[in-house]
Amino acid sequence: MTYPRLPILLLSLVILLVSCEKEEPIPLREPVPGGTTDRVYDYAATADSMQEATRTTYLGGDGTYVISNQGTTQFGNYWPNAHALHTLVDGYERTGDPAYLPRMIALLRGIKVQNGGTYSNVFNDDMLWLGNSSMRAYNATGNTEYLEVAEFLWQDVLGSYSEVFGGGITWKKDTPRMKNAVSNGPAIVLAMRLYEVNQDTTYLDWAKRLYDWQRANLLDPDTGEVWDNIYEEDGEVKIKKEWVFTYNMGTWIGAGLRLYNATGSESYLNDALRTARRTTVSPQLTTEGLLRDEGQGDGGLFKGILVRYLTDLILSPDIRDDDRDALVRFMRFNGETLHDQGIRRPDMIVGPDWRTQPDEVTDLTTQLSGLMLIEAMAKLAAAGLLG
């Protein structure tokens, strides 16, 4: 992923963030205590429909997905396709339908083909997204090809670690003086996924090291918001504190939760909870409890990534009931809003604003975020958390 690909989106985001940076946290709007409605939602059925619609609309060459719903054959880029693998794993885990298995492996191999015959990429975050989805595919299927890809990607990314700014992994292989939350949060999560599989403490040590560095450099100690990056400009080290994005909040939550699960240290869980709580009220991230429209292109995927890791936190047995209830209400409000207002039927397409119907053009990234939310709601429903 790269910011320069979408200058218009980024300009609008910067304007939005600057305009909001002095606002106070906004409480979650909750029309009905404990939820938003008494209506019963069949999120599993909706997820099935969206899975089929996404495949029918966006499937391109070599088992990969194209960039938009406009009949193009253009590859939908490396990192969105990595998240498409996540959604296929979601569907397989929820249904057990073996039809997902050939789709998953075809997508993995197709990314390599579309990327010039290699999984290696100049964008470290792109490789980390694929490493994480590959680990989920391995855990779901036992196919060691996914594990081998994840291990290769981890080693490739680790080559971009340096002691510049005291540690951390660079955003890209060719940006030695720029280190981002997006190249470190997902790295922590990937290291922990690998550790969970093989119990090699080298992965755990790396996860702790990267976590400590990110916490010291890219985390607001007062709010739990995750700052986007640290960089050097004209010899001066600066931190991009005004850029706060949902996906960085999500991977930080995921990193803290996994380190807590492995170590039992409550400081990690407390960090994850603080960031999760902030997400639900931050004027930079939500509007009256609804996750903000972050545009299409790269930004279209940001909310879906947050939703994935927020769901993991909700399902943790070790968080307090009041925290779980508050986070479920937040998810429920977003899920019901998207289900009722944001999905265009019958083609099951989603736009970047979950309160409104999509425009004619819907990017793959935007569609995937909507699918991720519906799959997350199906998981919460299966766990008995939606009533």
Image (cartoon, rainbow, N blue to C red):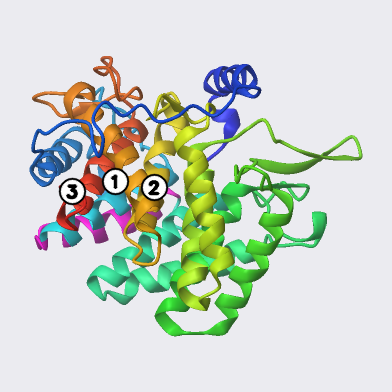
* Residue 98 in view, yes or no: yes
Secondary structure category for the residue under label 3:
helix
Secondary structure category for the residue under label 2:
helix
Q: Which residue is mark 3?
A: 378
Please tell me which residue is depicted at 39% across the width and 59% down the height of the picture. Answer: 320
Q: Which amino acid type is marked by label 2?
A: Gln
Question: What is the crowding at mark 1: few (fewer than 14 residues within 10 Å), some, or many (at least 20)?
Answer: many
Please tell me which residue is depicted at 73% across the width and 51% down the height of the picture. Answer: 217
Q: CA distance from mark 3 to mark 1?
A: 25 Å
Query: Which numbered marker is on residue 114?
Result: 2
Tell me the quarter of the picture where residue 242 sits. top right
Query: Which numbered marker is on residue 4?
Result: none
Report the predominant secondary structure element of the magenta stretch: helix
The mark closer to the camera, 2 or 3, is 3
Q: Which amino acid type is marked by label 1?
A: Thr
Magenta span: 96-115
Residue 38, placed above or below residue 328 = above
Q: Which amino acid type is marked by label 3?
A: Ala
Please tell me which residue is depicted at 26% across the width and 18% down the height of the picture. Answer: 358
Question: What is the crowding at mark 3: few (fewer than 14 residues within 10 Å), some, or many (at least 20)?
Answer: many
Query: Which numbered marker is on residue 64?
Result: 1
